[in-house]
Every structure is written in structure tokens, then in C-alpha cells.
Image (cartoon, rainbow, N blue to C red):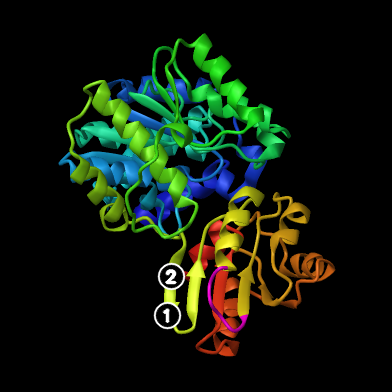
Amino acid sequence: MNYQETVHWLFNQLPMYQQVGAIAYKKDLTNTILLANHLGNPELELKTIHVAGTNGKGSTSSLLASVLQEAGYKVGLYTSPHLKDFRERIKINGKEITEEFVVDFVHKHQSFFETNELSFFEMTVGLAFDYFVKEKVNFAVIEVGLGGRLDSTNIITPLVSVITNIGLDHTQLLGTTLEAIAFEKAGIIKEKIPVVIGEYMAETQQVFIEKAKREHAAIYFASDLITEVYPTALQGDYQLQNRKTVIQTIKILQKNKLLQLSEEDIKNGLLNVVKNTGLQGRWQILNASPKVICDTAHNKQGLALVINQLLKENFDTLHIVLGFVADKNIDDILPLFPKNAHYYYSKPQNLRGLDANVLMEKGLNNGLNGKAYISTSEAYKVALHQATKNDLIYIGGSTFVVAEII
């Protein structure tokens, strides 16, 4: 198989959460451990930072990787989902894994994958760990795919664990309360491994404290401990807390003499994160006149922050290109959106995409007036045509909506 055929096989051969949702979720780590053993346990050879959380884990992971790169380290970065190309998930110093390595890895292990019915995510985690070891990275920043306790990445023993925050998302898999979701995320807290908590609430703090106590793990609440932050290229207001989380994590690594870097490295890492890692879709400005902003926020907690920032912008008319996947509780999300905007409803090009007409009907019921379009690109095209130079266009609701535009 060539690269495109290989990626097509990965996407379609076995369940992939990005495409099909809940049925792709595995209830234990048996297959991941089986694969790790088959690959010679590459996870044991990596110095890792493990990042979980409802929102901000992609930004936090990229910021951490960028800081380490500024200090001169060779840094692996594993994130999900991708926006355009599968290879975005696996990078070293901002450079994506080669097509050749992906093809060779799948070809070499394909019969094992098929025999043991491995999921898309299990195979991808194995690929990332194998690649990072073979390329001899100094550190690998590993973002959790979903949850934590049962996530395929949770076979690592990191230098430090990070949990950005907790919100109500993926409730059909992780639980319907903040405490239940916190329990799943806290599953990455390991024995005697320090853990950084980015943000907490009364409902989640005790879950983290109790888990850390059971594991004899030192726990650090970044929002309480970090008072000074540095500027970053990431312009979203919500990045303030991610920066605090990153600085606290770096401080622990320095304190434990696990790395050497300067304050300048931290400052430059935050400033150069887009250049260093290629991160996209976080309050990303796509056009100046009219101003066009896209953001991958896709749940109530994340969208509340984004909409709050959106309404601080100066504009004559607000145009919103909006789409969601079907497993989001949009009845809770749509009331967040302003009624004095023009809406362009679309369905993401994804098996889980919510039908644009269904979304439009729900939007109209919430006083969000607009029309449904056959695609996100068509919705955006119409919005651009209708907007004047002093208007503002926002594109969001789903990672997959943003992916179709950038």
C-alpha cells in the first residue's frame, strides 16, 4: 500500500472514534499492552509528559513541546485529532512523521493488527511510541485521546502528569457528572509521579487530591501557584490558564533536575509555539477584512469562553458558521450563542456530523436566525460574500468544521 492507501486502511479497517464515536471506545488496556509487548515496549524507553483534560490539552501539549524545543531538546509530540493529515498527530520538533515510516510500520505489523483486532487509536499510539524511540527523542509530550484511565496512552510512566481541567464532554463514555469525569482523567496519576492540575472546581478538586494521595503523588494546582505568565502566540483568552499549567509543569521538571532550561526558553517557547509545533485552529485569524476567526472549541465549557471573547471584538455584524457532531448536547450549547448574529449552519464532513437542517431547526428554536448549507465550505463562502469589511465571521462548533476551512 502507498501512503494514502495505508491511511485509508487505518481509518476504515477498524473503529476510529473520530469517525464513529462511542463504539470505538475500548473498555480496557489489554490490546494496547499486547501491542506494546509486540513492539518491544517502546513506552519504557521514553521520557514523557502525559497531558489529559476536557479542554486545552492540545494547546498545553504544544506549548510544553515548544518550550522544550527552545531549550535545544529533540521533542516528540503526540496529539489528536488531526485537522488535515493523519501525520499531524505525530511530530518531532514540529516536523510530521514521514509517510514512509507510516507505510512501513503498518506493512510490518498489519497481520498482528488484524489478528488482534486493534483499534485505530491503539495502532496510532503504537506507531507514535515506536517512531519516537527510533528517532531517539529526548522527551515526548503525549496527549490523552479520550478520558485517561482507559486511554491507550496510559501505559506510560511519565516524568509528570498534567490534567488541564474538567468539563462535561463525552458524557456517554466518561460519566455524566464532573466527579465521574474527573475520576477518569485522574486515572493518569501514577505512583510517586507529580501531577499538575490546571483548573479545578469544588466537585473535582477532592477527586484529584484523593487519587494523588493513594498514589503518593505530589499534586500542584497551577491556578493557585502561578501568578506571573508570559505572552504567547496563541490569542485565545482561555490560553491564560494553559500558560500557567505549562509554567508549573516546567518548574516541577526543573526542581526534579529532569531538564535544563532558562526563563528565556520558557518565554520563547510560549511566543514561538505556532512556528515550533504547527498548532492550528486555536483562535486562529484567517482573514483581516472582514476579520475571520476560527476555533476548535466544541463543548459548553470551551465555547462559553470563546463566545465571551468573540463578543469583546469590534464589528458591525457578526456572522457565525456553525456545525457540530451528533453526540454533543447542543440543547445546552446553543443558548450560549448571541441572537443578534447571522448563522450559517452546516454538517461537518464526518460520519458523526449533525445534519445541518436539524441544527438549523434547533438554532431557530433558540432565536439563532440563519440558513442551512450543503457544506461548511459553502456556508463560509456565503458568509464571506455577505459580510462587509467591518463585519466579523466566526467558524466553529467542531474540530471538523474548522478542518474544512483552514
Q: Which residue corresponds to the image point at 68% horizontal and 75% vertical from the top-left?
A: 343
Tell me: residue 384, above or below residue 69: below
In the image, residue 268 lies at what x, y percent?
23, 51
* Residue at the disc numbered 1: 288
- Res 335 label: none
Q: Answer whether residue 249 is visible to the viewer in this image.
A: yes
Could you tell me residue 136's position as x and y percent? 19, 33
Q: Which residues are magenta?
A: 312-317
Q: Amino acid at mark 1?
A: Ala
Residue drawn at (66%, 66%), measured in percent from left and top?
347
Are dots 2 and 1 in contact, CB under 8 Å? yes
Which residue is at a point 17% across and 41% down the rendered structure image? 71
Give yes or no for residue 381 being in the magenta stretch.
no
Give the position of the C terminus as an image quadrant: bottom left
**In this rendering, would 151 be left or right of 159?**
right
On the image, the x and y values in percent for residue 142 come to: 38, 35
314 is within the stretch colored magenta: yes
Instruction: From the top left corner, tell me how far across and down residue 189 is, in percent.
Output: 47, 21
Farthest residue, direction right: 365
User: Which amino acid, mark 2?
Assistant: Ile
Magenta segment's dominant SS is loop
Q: Residues within 10 Å of mark 1 (few under 14, many from 20)?
A: few
Residue 109 shows up from this direction: no
Find numbered disc 1 in the image and state the secondary structure of the residue it sits on. strand
Residue located beneath label 2 in the image: 285
CA gap between label 2 and label 1 equals 7 Å
